[in-house]
Image (cartoon, rainbow, N blue to C red):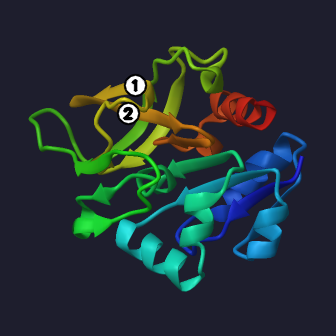
Amino acid sequence: MNLAIIDTGCANLASLKFALDRLGQKSIITHDLKELSQADKLLLPGVGTAAKAMENLQALNLENFLQTTTKPLLGICLGMQILGNFSQELEQETLKIIDFETMKFKQKADFTFPHMGWNQVSSTHELFKGLNGAYFYFVHSYHIPLNAYTIAECEYSTKFSASVNRANFYGVQFHPERSGEAGEVLLKNFISM
């Protein structure tokens, strides 16, 4: 299996690569279109702002590749959020691959933001095989409301999409590479699908 971690310049790429190494899965970190085109599966991690991620993707000429690829792709955290149409974060248009908008959490008593830490996820989708009710590690101030593409739910002040899917595109709001055994199982599920 040839896995490529897309280097957007907006992520801690090493921790994801180490997680894949622990699973015995070789991967490369690259933004080279030829290398990405030769991969069997793609991972799109992201940390930071949607605006910076989109700026970097455009500068690297990756936007069209991502929008048109037929390879299985897993967006992680910000990498999931930019699969949608728009992010309220700096009012940024995103990749428009999946029909959703990323919204800022509304302040609520008894909740602190960003949403940071372990939270339970509910799903019966094959990406979450053996993981319904498992806990994953989250760090985010923006969320994707439940929608037609939601395949996993979580709740923190409100119910939101912990994972989405359309065709070959998948996304998870949490960090599987920081989620211990559950995260490893999810990465294995994605690789074996």
The quarter of the picture where residue 99 lies is top left
Up-down relation of residue 50 to residue 132 (above or below): below
| Residue that numbered label 1 is attached to | 153
Up-down relation of residue 75 to residue 93 (above or below): above
Q: Please tell me whether mark 1 sits on a helix, a strand or a loop.
A: strand
Identify which residue is drawn at 52% across, 32% down. Answer: 136
Q: Determine crowd level at label 1: few under 14, some 14-19, many 20+ residues with C-alpha closer than 10 A.
A: some
Q: Where does residue 146 sit, x and y in percent of width and height?
A: 31, 30
Report the front residue among 80 and 138: 80
The number of discs equals 2
Q: Determine crowd level at label 2: few under 14, some 14-19, many 20+ residues with C-alpha closer than 10 A.
A: many
| Residue that numbered label 2 is attached to | 161
Report the front residue among 58 and 47: 58
Label 2 and label 1: CA atoms lie apart by 5 Å
Up-down relation of residue 162 to residue 36 (above or below): above
Q: Where does residue 75 sit, x and y in percent of width and height?
A: 56, 50
Residue situated furthest left in the rendering: 109
- Please state, as top left, top right, bottom left or bottom right, where the C terminus lies in the image: top right
| Label pair 2/1, CB-CB below 8 angstroms | yes
Say whether residue 173 is left or right of residue 184.
Answer: left
Closer to the N terminus: mark 2 or mark 1?
Answer: 1
Identify which residue is drawn at 28% across, 36% down. Answer: 145
